[in-house]
Image: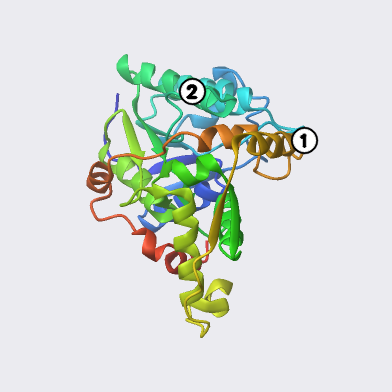
Amino acid sequence: MNTATPRSVLVCGASGFVGRHVVRALREAGLAVTAGTSRTQDFQQDLTPEAWLPRVTGFDAVVNAVGLLRDTPRRQLEPVHHQAPAALFEACASAGVARVVQISANGVAHSPTRYATTKRAADEVLLHLRAEGRLDATVLRPSIVFGRGGASAALFMNLARLPVLVLPRAAVQAQVQPVAVPDVALAVLRLLQDGGPEIVTAVGPRALPLAAFIGELRRQRGQLGQGGLRGQGGRGGRGDLQPARVIPLPDAPSRWSARLGDFLSGQPWSSESLALLEQDNIGDAAAFERVLGRPAVPIEQFVEAAWASDV
């Protein structure tokens, strides 16, 4: 198994939110990156190592940044999260790819949701190949990833506009540890350059309830003003917004609203989303900083950092 620093990298899911940032970070570091997209790779159909072997041959490293939150009419979680990545990883092992990074998600180790179980199944395939000595591989599991262009970030920023928040009780109680998307991309670069442990949990410096996180984004919106939120990074003159009033939604109405969301595949709220919110999503910030080689972006700087980026 070749463990030299890779130079040529295939990034699967390069057109996605995290994938775009990974491609940029790797290219800025001087790596030759091939951006794999749905036009060149079909994670719904390419489910055998034979289908992937010619695509990974010749690359020093492969990053899998493909992911779905839920089933859609055109794409299903089982093939996209599990079967296609498993075939991809086996092909990488056969082709002698030096390093593989699988971008998974924090919290999948114990969650019973289909999102988590399908992600976890692919993670386990990759970790098994590592244990056999066939791949130098790491599973990167981020907490909530915040950045411009992310669906969850857009949702949180829209919620941060509201003076009254009606949130599921789980969102008020459960702890999250959001991480800035440039830090996730940098972690991928470091893992490709230096290797790493089996699993890396990507988290920001501070854990807090999701409701408090939205409240912090609201505070930052007020400081930046509308001009900054349009992407120029400038400061507006609105001043701090008043803290929003948070109303916990009881469990039964939360479940009803999530079930309604199950029928609306174009938006992120669903029974799967609610189940993921019901568990803490935190990790060891100091361990992640050691992977980065610097402190992670603090939550208090998320909005300014994200809207200053043009990715």
* Dot 2 or dot 1, earlier in sequence: 2
> Does the image show residue 31?
no
Q: How is the image coloured?
A: rainbow
**Residue lying farthest top?**
132
Label 2 neighbour load within 10 Å: few <14, some 14-19, many 20+: many
Q: Which quadrant holds residue 138?
A: top left
Instruction: Give SS at disc 1.
Output: loop
Query: Where residue 264 sits in the image (x, y, percent)?
Result: 76, 40
Mark 2 → mark 1, Cα distance in angstroms: 27 Å
Q: Which of 241 and 179 is in front in this view?
A: 241
What count of labels does the image hold?
2
Task: Name, please, the residue furthest toward the bottom.
Answer: 237
Residue depth check, mark 2 versus mark 1: number of the one nearer the observer? 1
Image point (58%, 48%), residue name = 167
Residue 283 appears anywhere in the view? yes
Q: Which mark is residue 198?
A: none
Q: Label 2: which residue? A: 122
Of the residues shown, which amino acid type is indicated by label 2?
Ala
Instruction: Say which residue label 1 marks.
Output: 263
- In the displayed structure, would residue 43 be above or below residue 295? above
Residue 86: x percent and y percent? 51, 21
Residue 168 is situated, as x and y percent measured from the top left of the image, at 58, 43
Q: In this view, does 95 lie above or below 60?
A: above
Quarter of the rendering occupied by the N terminus = top left
| Amino acid type, label 1 | Phe
